[in-house]
Image (spheres, coloured by chain):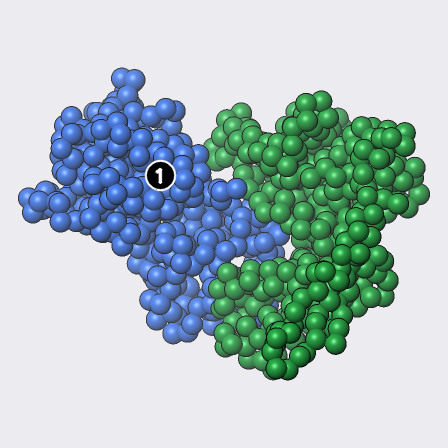
Amino acid sequence: MSKVRICALVALAIGAATPTVAQEVFKVEGAPKVAIVLFGPKNDGGWSQAFEEARPSLEKVMGATIPVVDKVPEDAASITPPVERFIQRGHNVIIGTAFGYSDTFKKLSEKHPKVAFLNASGITNGPNLESFYGRTYQSQYLCGMVAGAVSKSGKLGFVAANPLPVVNWTINAYELGAKKMNPNATVTVVFTGAWNNPVKERAAAAALIDQGADVIGQHVDTPTPQIVAQERGVYGTGHHRDLSEFAPKATQCSSIWTWAKFLGPELEAIKAGNWKPQPYGAFPGIKEGGTDVACCGSAVSAEAKEKIMAARQAIIDGDPIFAGPLKDRDGKERLAAGAKIDDAGLWKMDWFVEGVVAQQ
Amino acid sequence: MTDQAMSDQAMSDRAVDRGMTAAAGERGRFRLGRLNVEVRREAGAAWRAFLTAASVALGLGLSAAILVAAGVPAANLVDELLVQTLFDGQNLHAVLFQAAPLMLLGLAAAMAFRVRFWNLGLEGQMIFGGIGATAVSLAGVGPESLRLPMMGLAAIVFGMAWTSVPLLLKLKVGVNEIISTLLLNYVAMNLLFHLLYGAWKDPRDGFPHSPAFAPFETLPTIAFDLSAALVVALAAVAFCVYLLARSRAAIYMRFVEASPSAARALGVPVAGVTIFAVLLSGALASLAGFVIVSGQEGRLTQSFFHGYGVSGVLIAFLARSNPLAAAIVATLMATLYVAGQNLQVFYAIPGAMVQLIQALVVICVAASDFLVRHRVRWVR
């Protein structure tokens, strides 16, 4: 059966609604020693490999090698032994990489109050535990602009895993970005119900192309939609890593993780003894490192590229992307004129903007 | 004489015809003789034990060679792979934590295999066990002190109900259970997702897992920091051992396993025995789902059942459907898994290599079956 993973995070939703909890400094005992626990194989071409690729620069920060255990599934019986073993061997900074590690990491962080825990796409936090995830709607917005720019028909296809807020916001941002370049652009979404199911992804991408989509975006874990786009002679945009590696002719933009840029300063802070785990998790964007784009492919004109890079700079300077007036596809007003979405709104996003066609 | 024994006899008669020619061949200048393979009737317990031990040793030896070739220092291999895994309190704890559900699944597969029902639906039955237990938790059925046993009971009832689908399909309309049980796993999985993405989504954080169980709904830790899951698993092992050693049902099951048609002709209630064994199998698998959900995860999650189905079938196969052997094999599998993770921690070898090592050991043990059933002789 296919692996099910939720790239999802942090109950920031709660965080924005309640008064801020004071951040406390957490110090590890002795010199920090880092270890990483990966959900998938370290060469999975996507989510897990993005961490593996951040490792050399993190090793430079720490001045030591950082050991990795890969293929650790999301159940307590599999997660606990390697983490306990690392701690037994003197590692006191443990980085996890899955939503399904949340509960186990919480328990482990309570059992080992002197060890620092970080968990990508987790939803639990504590005095020595910080979950983190990237603002992927920023990078997917830029890829949406690319899609709008290279599409001739204005019909874009999108292969997505599950209708969760973290996925919904990438779809909505993709459509908003596409509209920026082509006001008539629409995004048709197929949810495969799985993060890693190349067979369904292939069928979904092919069906979208059959219906006239000439750019295929994605928020799933494999490069299959890009490969199908290349086979069928249309364009595509990737997720996790620069997927032009798999489909050099098709992939024009990829939303990529830039974990070294986020984790580097985190580890520096741990080393310096002034790490403050965010009480509701860290949620870095392009500015802080977390997500970014690998852009652009040869089909993107110089003029379009200039616009896209200007939009990237605007995001770094504070463009919220989801800003009023904004209606959902049923015409209901979601953001009044002048309003900006907050993190609580992002983590609850269960609606689609105008121009999104989805079966959900 | 059973079917098996009769066919063994027939094969034995042909054994000489199947003699294999040794490498040099008869026409070669150096006549080396022939390697004769004969089917043997009965292999002694001592011979079996020796073969199993030897095959485990061979598998570990091959694995060690691969690890050393991959750059793991040979000197501390034994210490890190075996000694630290089994004689370190924390590691032993991790092994037993993993072993409890594996034992239940090994038993589940074994019970069904004993009546020639190839139950490949263990994961679906686990899912239904998890769903049953979670339903009781969500509905708040019964007082707090009785909640845990009621969750276990609901798990068993749900699991048995789900197992009865392929069972009835087989008994009533002759649908091959290999196909139906395997494919029903996907139906169960999608039902699980339907619940977790819909009605049972955790309202606290909106993520697709059930709300966390209350402390009295999770299996407690008993003496020596061990989970009560182990007690459940060992009780199930004892029950199955007793059942097979003492009950009339067990004798009937041996008839059905040997030949359903002959058993029917002899007046054995074949359908009744099959129903009993298969429902028991479903109950054991759903109990495994319950101990994982309640004892390890603390809530119903999307992936708690992953990979356990294959492990259960493998354990029953290696244990030759013997419950006591299944418990031992399950513990060995858990040891291999934890030892493999330790190797990753120590030497940064990839997870794929750990799986390779585990597969090597398992294949060696499986292949030793050939020598249990056959005698190989050199004929000059």
- The residue sitting at 69% across, 39% down in the picture is B118
Residue A126 visible in image = yes
Q: How many marks?
A: 1
> In this view, which residue lies farthest toward the front?
B27
Chain rendered blue: A
Residue A171 visible in image = no
- Say which of A98 and B310 sits in front: B310
Residue B209 percent across, percent down from the top left: 54, 36
Chain rendered green: B
In the picture, the quarter occupied by the C terminus of chain B is bottom right
Residue B325 percent across, percent down from the top left: 79, 55
- Give the residue at mark 1: A202
Quadrant of res B216? top right
Q: Is A2 placed above or below A72 here?
A: above
- The residue sitting at 60% across, 42% down in the picture is B305
In the picture, the quarter occupied by the N terminus of chain B is top right
Residue A88 percent across, percent down from the top left: 59, 68
Q: Horizontally, is A346 left or right of B376 in the view?
A: left
- The residue sitting at 29% across, 24% down in the picture is A357
- Say which of A340 and B321 sits in front: B321
Q: Horizontally, is A314 left or right of A357 in the view?
A: left
Q: Is B312 placed above or below A93 here?
A: above
Q: Horizontally, is B292 left or right of A171 in the view?
A: right
> In this view, which residue lies farthest toward the top?
A331
Subunit of label 1: A
